[in-house]
């Protein structure tokens, strides 16, 4: 059963150059799983949030490619806020944790990698269901 303490900020390689910096990420090296899906979140209107769900099995790795935003992780007992604002840091989020994203800056871009292909049945979209599954040891 994952806890907020299992969520980790991982520093990615960064090559500085006067012409512009370069960073990269590799599965099973920087990202602790095989990547099955990649998607990005952008053009989030001021005051809106994203997420508001948990996954039964899918793991995620989140990078703020541009701008900044906060990721709130909840394990059913504790919450922790991670501020992402550098493109050379990624946030590893194991399965079984509730997540929300908020406070998106103008022109922010969130890049997300998942350990599974899109599977609607893997989503837990209601917080009360998340709490029940968590307290029963099912996630």
Image: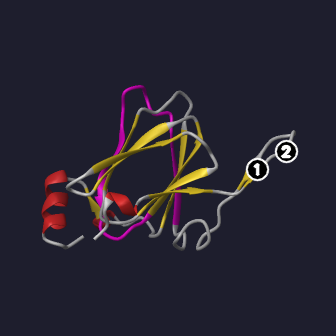
Residue range (magenta): 37-59
Name the residue at 53% across, 70% down.
Answer: 32
What numbered label is drawn on residue 17? 2
Q: Is residue 133 left or right of residue 59?
A: left
Identify the image quadrant of residue 121.
Answer: bottom left
Q: Are marks 1 and 2 in contact (CB under 8 Å)?
A: yes
Residue 123 location, x and y as percent?
A: 30, 61
Residue 105 location, x and y as percent?
A: 50, 29
| Residue nearest the observer in this picture, 11 or 67 | 11
- Mark 1 Cα-neighbour bin, 10 Å: few <14, some 14–19, many ≥20: few
How many marks can you see? 2
Name the residue at 35% across, 66% down.
Answer: 95
Q: Quarter holding the C terminus?
A: bottom left
User: Is residue 49 covered in magenta?
Assistant: yes
| Residue nearest the observer in this picture, 13 or 123 | 13
Residue 5 location, x and y as percent?
A: 36, 60
Q: Is residue 87 left or right of residue 71?
A: right
**Disc 1 element:** strand
Could you give the CA–CA distance between mark 1 and mark 2, rounded to whole angstroms?
A: 8 Å
| Residue nearest the observer in this picture, 89 or 99 | 89
What numbered label is drawn on residue 22? 1
- Of mark 1 and mark 2, the one earlier in the sequence is 2
């Amino acid at each position: 059963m994952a806890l907020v303490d299992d969520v980790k900020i991982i520093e990615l390689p960064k090559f500085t150059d006067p012409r512009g910096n370069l960073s990269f990420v590799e599965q099973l090296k920087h990202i602790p799983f095989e990547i099955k899906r990649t998607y990005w979140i952008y053009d989030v209107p001021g005051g809106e949030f994203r997420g508001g769900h948990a996954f039964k099995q899918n793991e995620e790795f989140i990078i703020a490619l541009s701008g900044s935003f906060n990721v709130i992780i909840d394990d059913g007992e504790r919450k922790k806020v991670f501020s992402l604002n550098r493109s050379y840091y990624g946030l590893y989020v194991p399965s079984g944790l509730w997540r929300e994203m908020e406070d998106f800056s103008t022109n922010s871009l969130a890049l997300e990698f998942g350990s599974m292909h899109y599977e609607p049945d893997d989503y837990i979209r209601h917080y009360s269901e998340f709490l029940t599954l968590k307290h029963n040891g099912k996630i």
